[in-house]
Amino acid sequence: MFRRSFEIVGLGEHFRLTAADHGFALDAAQSRAVSALEGKRGVYLWGPVGRGKTWLMDAFFAGVHEKRKQRWHFHDFFRSYYAGGLALDGLRLVCFDEFHFHDPGDAMIVARLMRELFERRIRLVTTSNYPPSGLLPNPLHHHLFEPTIELITARMDVVELAGPVDYRSLDATEHWGVYSWPACEPSDGVHFTFDFLCRGPRSVQDYLGWAAEGRSWVVTGVPALAAVSPDARQRFLNLVDVLYDKGIHLVLNGQLPLDAVLADVNLPDFARTASRLRLLKQVWRNHDTVPTSSS
């Protein structure tokens, strides 16, 4: 039981109206998630990409009548942590988007955070593509996170969102940005090359810092991801995570169609990246013809 109950007035109606504004109705799994969010326990939302996990968490964060709250994306959390700016004093709600760990050091940092949140009776709402048992999946390290998994299942309502609909694919008229090939779509914004961003020693902290400097990015020279090094692929995944979460308008340019860029990649969490990149309007363009597009 938390120290004081949240003042949640009409939260279920808030969800229904917000969904209607976006052109859909809550499905059965989303309705179960709303019921859990209307309670007082922590909530762990998990399931495949495009099932509305982040949307539900963000709608909850906006609809709760509580000012003492904090929302972190996975990468933002670690940036704040390493900058020494992780302040929990006075908080009553923490929302943590994209809860996933493949590095044991990251997992141990979050394990300490979760213990402190539970000790302080701060409510925690998370989203993940993994069930609690799938966190830190490497069998060499998984045992390190098992005590935290037990805490999650004991102290939080675990709700799976695995309906048949990928909501990101419903509205083909809304695009996050543009993917053009082989010539670049003319666009204002901060210009980078793939090689600069992903082949060199860049970090998530670099991407977060640069994302604060411009609301539109143009990234040229995107190759087939299967043909680059594992480090370059992982940097590209991190880059897409950061730009998507920050709402940065993205123009990508490559020499191949987007499906060819994404083909034959086997990385943890790549399904999330591919789903987001398919929100880009795809434009075939050369220097002599009018471009054509597909969704």
Image (cartoon, grey):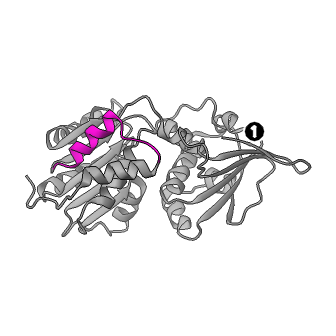
Residue that lies at the very extreme toward the right in this rendered image: 288
Identify the residue position indicated by label 1 in the image: 256
Boundaries of the magenta span = 23-39
Between 13 and 282, the residue placed more toward the observer is 13
Q: How many marks?
A: 1
Looking at the image, residue 87 sits to the left or right of residue 202; the answer is: left
Residue 96 visible, this angle: no
Coordinates of residue 112 in the picture (x, y in percent)? 22, 53
Looking at the image, residue 295 sits to the left or right of residue 155; the answer is: right
Q: Amino acid at mark 1?
A: Leu
Label 1 secondary element: loop
Coordinates of residue 223 in the picture (x, y in percent)? 71, 42
Does the magenta run of residues contain 283? no
Looking at the image, residue 128 sits to the left or right of residue 113; the answer is: right
- Can you say whether 233 is above or below 6 in the image? above
Coordinates of residue 219 in the picture (x, y in percent)? 68, 55
Question: What residue sits 20% from the left and 59% below the top?
Answer: 9
Coordinates of residue 43 in the picture (x, y in percent)? 23, 45
Question: What residue sits 19% from the left and 62% below the top?
Answer: 92
Does the magenta run of residues contain 24? yes
Question: What residue sits 37% from the left and 68% below the top?
Answer: 83
Question: What residue sits 54% from the left and 38% below the top?
Answer: 169
